[in-house]
Amino acid sequence: MITRNLGTKISVREIKRLTESDTEGMFGYPQLVLSAKSNIAVIRFLTERIKDIEKEIMSQVKLRKEFKSLLTIPGIGDILGLTIMLEVGDINRFPKVGDYSSYCRCVKAERLSNGKSKGEGNRKNGNKYLSWAYVEAAHFAIRYCPEAQRFYQRKMAKKNGIVAIKALSNKIARASYYVMRDQVPFDEAKLFRVQ
């Protein structure tokens, strides 16, 4: 609404800090002020409901010991950690990291025979919730982990943003497989080969 009516951009953080009184000086028409006040009220209401839901979920479900080390991975917090834990189940059902990565929809679905393509259409195999969780983790990792940001920038220079995010999400999924299986904390040096 701000971009459309004022021609300026404002960050999500700044929008969350806005109060209803701030909108009165922003817009020239009372209808726009009323609409902005309503939007701010909706944002505040939904933010509170989301916090209530997260609080209730955290009181009902606790991370199992093999998943506690997931929280050491940049980009994975309480909610993404719970999502991964509940969707994965027993990590030992995946014999290899590639099986897990494929189940998380982090790799390209190809049917090859002798190096030749023998069809497609297998994209929807796997778990869509894990796919979502790892893409979200990749977005957060880009914000808070300089090594993840550098990896993303290198990939984006060669391809596009979507391919770069999926590549980073695959790296995070592979790292989380070993973190969950071996019950060890995340090691950034191993993932991004930091010297």
Image (tube, rainbow, N blue to C red):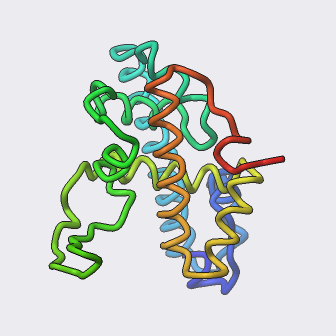
Q: Nearer the viewer, residue 146 or 79?
A: 146
Depicted 97 relative to depicted 168: above or below? above
- What residue do we see at 69% from left, 50% from top? 192
Residue furthest to the front in view is: 114
Quadrant placement of the N terminus = bottom right
- What residue do we see at 72% from left, 69% from top? 25
Horizontal side of residue 179 vs 49, given as left or right: right
- What residue do we see at 30% from left, 33% from top? 88
Query: How far across and down, in percent of the image, does residue 12 sit?
Result: 63, 59
Depicted 182 relative to depicted 130: above or below? above
Query: How far across and down, in percent of the image, does residue 89 sit?
Result: 27, 27
Q: Nearer the viewer, residue 56 or 8?
A: 56
- The quadrant in which residue 9 appears is bottom right
Query: How far across and down, in percent of the image, does residue 151 sit?
Result: 68, 62
Query: How far across and down, in percent of the image, does residue 86 sit?
Result: 30, 29
- What residue do we see at 55% from left, 54% from top? 138
- The quadrant in which residue 13 appears is bottom right
